Amino acid sequence: MKRKFSKVLGTSAEQPGFEIDLRYKNDKESFPCAILRFEEKSLFELATKELANFEFGSKIMLQCVPFDDIEMYRNLGDNFVLAKSDKVGTMFTDDCRNWMLDEKCREQLLLRYQQETEIHSWHSFDGLQKYYCGEKQKEQNKVWCYWEVHWSPHGNFFTTFHKPGILIWGGDEMQNKRRFMHNQVTNVQFSPTEKYLVTWNG
């Protein structure tokens, strides 16, 4: 775990700049959380950004919470329900539309070949320029998507298909906005406003 986090944060495994406190329930199973202690504030700030929604293995997505906020989460109670507006706001954020404010009014173009999935900005004068080509996944020695991909109607969201379900991507750095579990999913349909979607595995 320390070696993988060091690679993401750009530090060496020998001097990572942080310590991990991971407790175990028994000989084989750990508790689903760990405490990271950082030597420098700048590394802590980087970790809160890079480790949020970090894919740790094929079925685990990490969340990074500052220790000072833990008491707030503890006080939410067992019956806390996230408000519907917050659920929608988490996915449908303004940064997913930033590409439409491009100074040169460039379009986004998707290329797929071999095991590569690449999104480029396109302009008739400048040609193709890289936007996002799965760099974060490559740092973890992963392939961004082996299977199908799908754009939302207005191009604000990019969908990748995986055996357990679909992932929704968007924003300036093509971040994972939402995961929808649907085993062996084969198709997805967005509403015209991109506010709703349905999946199908028939």
Image (spheres, rainbow, N blue to C red):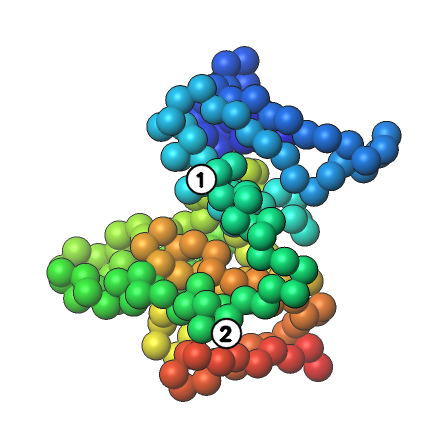
On the image, the x and y values in percent for residue 57 come to 65, 44
Q: Inspect the image, locate mark 1, and give the three-letter code of the amino acid beneath it.
A: Thr
- Compute the Cα span from label 1 to label 2: 25 Å
Q: Residue at x 52, y 49 (%)?
A: 72
Q: Is residue 100 left or right of residue 71?
A: left
Residue bearing the label numbered 1:
48
Residue bearing the label numbered 2:
84
Could you say whether the residue bearing mark 2 is in a helix, strand or loop?
Answer: helix
Q: Quadrant of residue 77?
A: bottom right
Q: In what quadrant of the picture does the N terminus appear?
A: top right
On the image, the x and y values in percent for residue 154 come to 34, 77
The answer to whether 85 is drawn above or below residue 66 in the figure is: below
Of discs 1 and 2, which sits in the foreground?
2
Q: Is residue 137 left or right of residue 124?
A: right
Decide if residue 160 is in sight here.
no
On the image, the x and y values in percent for residue 175 come to 43, 54
Quick one: 99 or 2, which is closer to the camera?
2
In primary-sequence order, the first of circles 1 and 2 is: 1
The answer to whether 196 is drawn above or below residue 98 in the figure is: below
Q: Quadrant of residue 24?
A: top right
